[in-house]
């Protein structure tokens, strides 16, 4: 088990993107276009603030469309964008502020020419976060948010993954059999039987969970005789990551907005000092479009 921020574990694992709307690899391309439109509308040298940035997916998309932008990025987790610097060289141009609360920003009033956030602001106390965003924005500056929708192709599959992780980590589940095997409290045949039960279970499975679990078990079995401490650490680490992923997805599900809560967020933005506030469903893809979230557009009064 772990008490560490599940998002810290996620970003420290070297991820750039936290969510896509389907298994279609083009999804992120469409989301990048959403941010490119915003970036192209900004003046040369504009200073932008990306809230709850993670490892910088939005800054990468913004800078791809407008290389002159100066971007600051904050996140409450202990992010690790440096792990992605070789693949995304523009990350080196972004000033990151890890372990920073978007409800208590370390910036002067009216500092920025624009604010962005992708699947982030909705996790925070929304009224406080919106007031802080308004405080650091210049009058007339735009804010664009992409927010979780409770019926989106991101949120709905989370239920299946959470259920899968609960099955894996229950007292008689596959992970417990793995730990017993490593501690020489269980036989290989028992572990193999638990593995077959997991794979044969008709309940839905996600490729990234099942693939990593089976590969990890193979490594544990290989290490058990010659490197027992390493095998135990690997088994415990698998459990830690699974629990953290379940917590992360549960937070994602809880943060997602239905139509009523989206309307409340719109009102909160108005009360925080924004005008021209609109919030609409955002889809990605040309054929059979997938619902990706809510798009909020606003201007600082």
Image: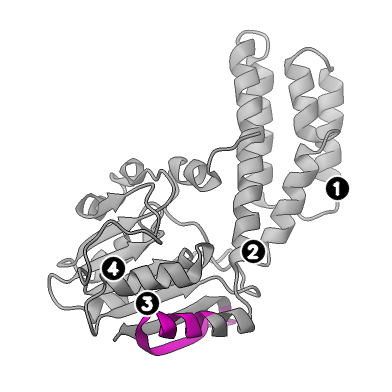
Residue farthest toward the bottom in the current orientation of the protein:
276
Q: Is residue 206 above or below residue 230?
A: below
Q: Position of residue 164 (x, y in %)?
A: 75, 49
Q: Position of residue 163 (x, y in %)?
A: 77, 52
As helix, strand or loop, the secondary structure at mark 1 comes to loop
The stretch of residues the image draws in magenta is 265-290
- Give the foreground label among 1 and 2: 2
Residue farthest toward the top in the current orientation of the protein:
226
In three-dimensional space, the C-alpha distance between marks 1 and 4, rounded to whole angstroms, equals 43 Å
- Give the foreground label among 1 and 4: 4
Q: Which residue is pictured at 28% across the width and 51% down the height?
A: 96
In three-dimensional space, the C-alpha distance between marks 1 and 3, rounded to whole angstroms, equals 43 Å
Q: Which mark is residue 144?
A: 3
As helix, strand or loop, the secondary structure at mark 4 comes to helix
Residue behind mark 4: 62
As helix, strand or loop, the secondary structure at mark 3 comes to strand
Q: Which residue is pictured at 51% across the width and 65% down the height?
A: 125
Residue behind mark 2: 254
In three-dimensional space, the C-alpha distance between marks 3 and 4, rounded to whole angstroms, equals 12 Å
Q: Is residue 179 above or below residue 288?
A: above
Q: Quadrant of the N terminus?
A: top right
116 part of magenta stretch = no
Q: Nearer the viewer, residue 78 or 151?
A: 78
161 sits to left or right of 262: right
């Amino acid at each position: 088990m772990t008490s560490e921020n599940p998002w810290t574990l996620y970003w420290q694992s070297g991820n750039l993107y936290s969510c896509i709307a389907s298994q279609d690899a083009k999804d992120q391309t469409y989301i990048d276009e959403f941010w490119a439109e915003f970036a192209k509308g900004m003046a040369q040298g504009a200073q932008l603030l990306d809230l709850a940035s993670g490892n910088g997916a939005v800054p990468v998309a913004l800078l791809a469309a407008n290389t002159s932008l100066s971007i600051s990025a904050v996140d409450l987790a202990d992010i690790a964008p440096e792990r992605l610097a070789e693949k995304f060289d523009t990350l080196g141009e972004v000033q990151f502020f890890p372990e920073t609360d978007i409800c208590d920003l370390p910036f002067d009033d009216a500092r920025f020419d624009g604010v962005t956030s992708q699947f982030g602001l909705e996790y925070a106390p929304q009224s406080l976060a919106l007031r802080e965003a308004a405080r650091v924005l210049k009058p007339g500056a735009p804010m664009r948010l992409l927010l979780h929708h409770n019926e989106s192709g991101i949120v709905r599959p989370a239920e299946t993954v959470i259920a899968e992780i609960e099955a894996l980590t229950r007292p008689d589940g596959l992970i417990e059999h793995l730990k017993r095997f490593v501690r020489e409290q269980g036989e290989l045949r028992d572990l193999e039987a638990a593995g077959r039960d997991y794979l044969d279970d008709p309940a839905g499975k996600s490729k990234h969970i099942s693939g990593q679990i089976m590969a990890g078990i193979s490594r544990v079995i290989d290490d058990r005789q010659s490197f027992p401490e390493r095998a135990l650490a690997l088994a415990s680490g698998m459990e830690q990551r699974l629990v953290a992923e379940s917590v992360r997805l549960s937070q994602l599900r809880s943060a997602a907005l239905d139509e009523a809560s989206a309307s409340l967020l719109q009102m909160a933005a108005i009360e925080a000092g924004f005008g021209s506030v609109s919030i609409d469903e955002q889809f990605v893809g040309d054929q059979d479009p997938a619902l990706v979230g809510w798009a909020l557009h606003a201007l600082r009064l």
